[in-house]
Amino acid sequence: MQRKALLIILTTLVMLFGCAPRDPNLVVRGLGEFGRAAGDYTLRVNLYDLDEKGHPRLVSAADPSLEGFVTRTLSPRGYVLRASGPARYNIDVHLLCGNMRTADMGLMSESLPVPPAAVGAGYDEHVYSWLPDRGLGAENRESSELRSSMQKRQGPRTMGYSSQTDRGGAPLGQTTPDYCQGRVLVVVSAAGAAPKREMYVGRAATDDCKAVNSCPADVCRSALEQSLVELLEHRF
């Protein structure tokens, strides 16, 4: 009876959290659907790692070096960075390095959201999450490419979330992961007539980073830079 009661409670909680209201004026699309004319933009690039409880924590905000990778990639395409003031587009980049096995994915799900305080006004967990691709459909290019990159990394091993190492973590009983992994999130919001908002979301996973205890952010930095540039070149 206790097990049955617990199952009912968990099911109810999942239904409650899964049915959170969505902003009817928010339109979310994949970054590959952007297809808009070049223009000026504001930029924010944040770098995170995971704390001891598996929660993303901000390591550096407005990282000048990481911002340089974005501006150098977009400049040849006609996009111009505006240091302040209103611009045609707002680009948010959130980069995470961690042992994904230790990440707190939430109750009965794999939700790894950006800390709301790091985003501020306009935060929406369906948009500002490294996992999953909620709000972009059950199957889309972002989720397909992410799965493909993970399969490529794992070689002949079967892709399945039941495996202890498939999320980029250590086998049970070990403190050092087989590898650390980086996650890339790019959110582009287009200025438009209020209250309607359009946001374009791109996500990617890096190849393996060096296996270091606790996976500090700098361990994945080079891999994150590469994945960020590739995401912008192929999708923007």
Image (cartoon, grey):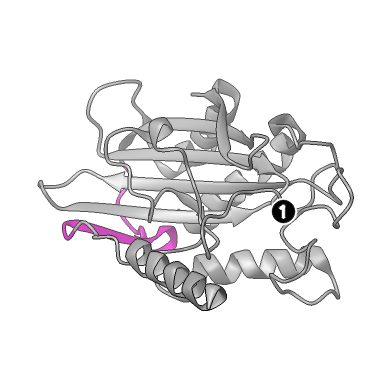
Residue name at image x 86 percent, y 57 percent: 171
Residue name at image x 84 percent, y 48 percent: 177
Q: Residue furthest front?
A: 1
Q: Amino acid at mark 1?
A: Arg
- Residue 153, by quadrant, is bottom right
What percent of the width, then of the height, locates residue 216?
73, 32
Q: Is residue 151 visible?
A: yes
Label 1 residue SS: loop
Was residue 25 drawn as part of the magenta stretch in this picture? yes
What percent of the width, then of the height, locates residue 30?
41, 62
Q: Is residue 136 visible?
A: no
- Is 10 left, or right, of 213 in this rendering? left
In the image, the segment drawn in magenta is 24-38
Q: Nearer the viewer, residue 179 or 202?
A: 179
- Is 172 left, or right, of 10 in this rendering? right
Q: Which residue is mark 1?
A: 101
Q: Nearer the viewer, residue 107 or 82?
A: 107
Few, some or many C-alpha atoms within 10 Å of disc 1 (few <14, some 14-19, many ≥20)?
A: many
Q: Nearer the viewer, residue 151 or 177?
A: 177
Q: Nearer the viewer, residue 39 or 20?
A: 20
